[in-house]
Image: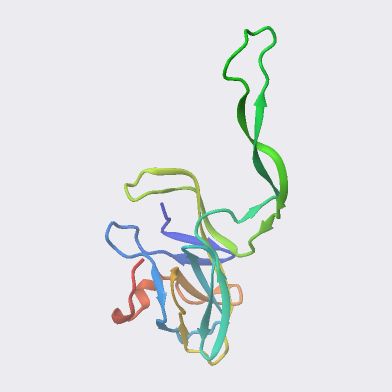
Amino acid sequence: MLPAKVDYAGVSFTLAPATTGKPNAVTTDGQTIHLPADKFNRLYLLAAAANGDQQADFKVGDKSVNLNVQDWTGFVGQWDDRIFKTTEETIPPRSGAPPQSNWPQVRLNEYGELIGIRPGYIKRADIGWFASHRHDAAASNEPYAYSYLFAYAIDVPSNASTFTLPRNHNIRILAVTVANQNTQAWPAQPLYDVLDPAEKRTK
């Protein structure tokens, strides 16, 4: 389902080929990536998390940046939502119906009693890619199972030469690129392809 390239705010992310059996994402495990020598001042990630949003520290040179990498699925915003308690209600006999030995009868009303309000929310990470459904392990469609990849920007110190990922196996990185202001300076490529072989981790 993933495209070959994702364009975001003037920056292009090139994704690894979506080929069966070939890795196209990196699980963060403290890997270090050597940055190019070209002039640039920002680093961009295309990423998402599994098992809920994940807080983690990324490091550019000696500078640590804490990011909230959002879950790849679910909702990125919701209105306030009413919370109800299910109640039992007696069903009255129908008018003119013959007497029944099993009265009274009851039914469940799942909206019987309002007990609170679940507050609305908006998640703030920029969405780099979106799909209204996804595929399961058998390649069948799962409709209305929303899927996202998020774009994160990190300012790069002038003397930085390395980019170090956190140790969190719930975070997946699909691409990384650098840019000078809003002009792309380093051809975007899949993160998996720029790692040393010993540091590669698959999804």
Q: Nearer the viewer, residue 145 or 158?
A: 145
Which percent across, then down, holds residue 98? 62, 7
Residue at horizontal 45 percent and vertical 84 percent from the top: 36
On-image quarter of the C terminus: bottom left
How many numbered circles does the render carry?
0
Q: Nearer the viewer, residue 6 or 106?
A: 106
Residue at horizontal 41 percent and vertical 70 percent from the top: 189
Q: Is residue 61 above or below residue 53?
A: below
Which percent across, then down, holds residue 25? 39, 66
Q: Nearer the viewer, residue 91 or 44?
A: 91
Does 197 sit left or right of 168 as displayed?
A: left
Residue at horizontal 71 percent and vertical 55 percent from the top: 119
Image-quadrant location for residue 90: top right
Which percent across, then down, holds residue 158? 57, 90
Q: Is residue 64 above or below residue 16?
A: below
Image-quadrant location for residue 167: bottom left
Residue farthest to the front, as pictured? 101
Q: How is the image coloured?
A: rainbow
Q: Nearer the viewer, residue 101 or 36?
A: 101
Which percent across, then down, holds residue 172? 44, 68
Q: Is residue 47 above or below residue 135?
A: below
Does 117 sit left or right of 15 as displayed?
A: right
Residue farthest to the left, as pictured? 21
